[in-house]
Image (tube, helix red, strand yellow):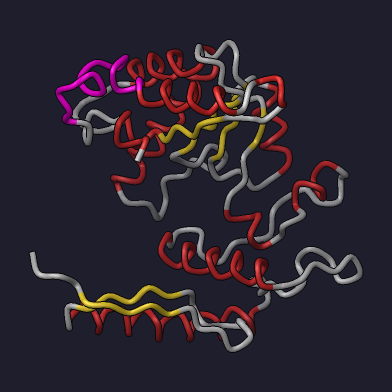
Amino acid sequence: MIAQFLSRTTNKRTDKYGGSSKNRARIVVDIYNAIRKEIPVETGFVVGIKLNSVEFQEEGLTNNEAVEIAQKIDNIGLDFIELSGGTYEDFKFKHRRETTVKREAFFLEFADKIKPAIKNAIVYVTGGFRTVPAMVQAIKENATDGIGLGRPITQDFDIPYQIINGLTQSAAEWPFADDYNSALFACTLQMCQAGLTEYSPEKGVNYGIMDLTDKKTLMEYQQVQNEIVQLIAKKAEERKFLLSIIPYQLNQKTFICEGTIPEI
C-alpha cells in the first residue's frame, strides 16, 4: 500500500499525499513519526523501508525522481533502506522477455544511483544474489552496505550463518529461477512448514522443510502444485476463488479457503 503512494502510476490523489514527490513520500514520514512517538530511537527498535524500482518505472519516470524520494525518506531517520526490483548479480538477457530485460536494466541503475545519495540509513540490496563472491564484490564496490536474500532463505533458513562462517560459497540451486508463480507457491509452503515445525537443535533449523534440490521431492511437489493450479483455474471459471497453501508435506493440513467472486 505504501508503494502505491510513492508511485505516480498509482497515486492519483489531489490532496497533500499526491502530486509532487514530497507529497507522495509524506505518508512514509507520517508513519515513521507515529512509530517513533510510541517506540523512540533510544529503545533500539529498528525501522526500515523497502523501495522497489518497479514503482518508479512507469509513466516515463526516471531514476532521478527515485533518488529524490529516497533522499527525502533517508532524512527522516530510518535505520535502513532496502532496494529491490531486479537481479543485481546475474544480469543475463537470455531466456528473458523484453519487459524483464528493461526492468533489470532499470533496477541496476536504480540501485547504483540511490546508494551514493543515501547519507544516513544503511542500504541493503535484495536482487538475485546467490554467490558469496558476488555479495562481497557488491559491498566492496560500495553498491550496497549489506545483502538481502529472499528465496534462498526459505530453502536454507540458516544460510546467513553458513555464509558468515565460511561454510558455503553460494545458495542452493533454485528450481524456479524463471517462474515467479511457482517460486511464490514453493516459498510460501516452505515458510508454512517452518512455522508448523518445532525447532530442534539436534535436527537443525531446516528440519521439516521440503528440500527442492532433491529431485524426487521436486517432482512430487510439482505434481501437487499443478493439481492445485488447475483447481484454481477451474474455480475461477465458476466465478469462485481458491486460496491455498500447496498441500504437500503439511501433516495432513490443507490450508484451503474457497469463496465466490462477487458480481461488480
In screen coordinates, is 114 left or right of 145? left
Determine the image quadrant of residue 240.
bottom left
Residue 245 image point, x, y percent: 48, 74
Residue nearer the viewer, 159 or 44: 44
In screen coordinates, is 82 left or right of 256? right
- Image vertical order of residue 164 relative to residue 24, above or below: below
Q: Main secondary structure of the magenta part?
A: loop
Residue 56 image point, x, y percent: 32, 29
- Furthest-bottom residue in view? 252
Quarter of the image that includes the C terminus? bottom left
Q: How many marks?
A: 0
Residue 15 image point, x, y percent: 18, 21
Residue range in magenta is: 12-26
In screen coordinates, is 47 left or right of 110? right
Residue found at x 71% / y 60%: 156
Determine the image quadrant of residue 215.
bottom right
| Magenta residue check for 16 | yes
Residue found at x 56% / y 16%: 77
| Magenta residue check for 207 | no
Residue found at x 45% / y 32%: 51
- Furthest-left residue in view? 264
- Furthest-front residue in view? 38
Residue found at x 53% / y 65%: 188
Residue 27 image point, x, y percent: 36, 26
Residue nearer the viewer, 130 or 28: 28
- Image vertical order of residue 127 relative to residue 243, above or below: above
Determine the image quadrant of residue 62.
top left
Quarter of the image that includes the N terminus? top left
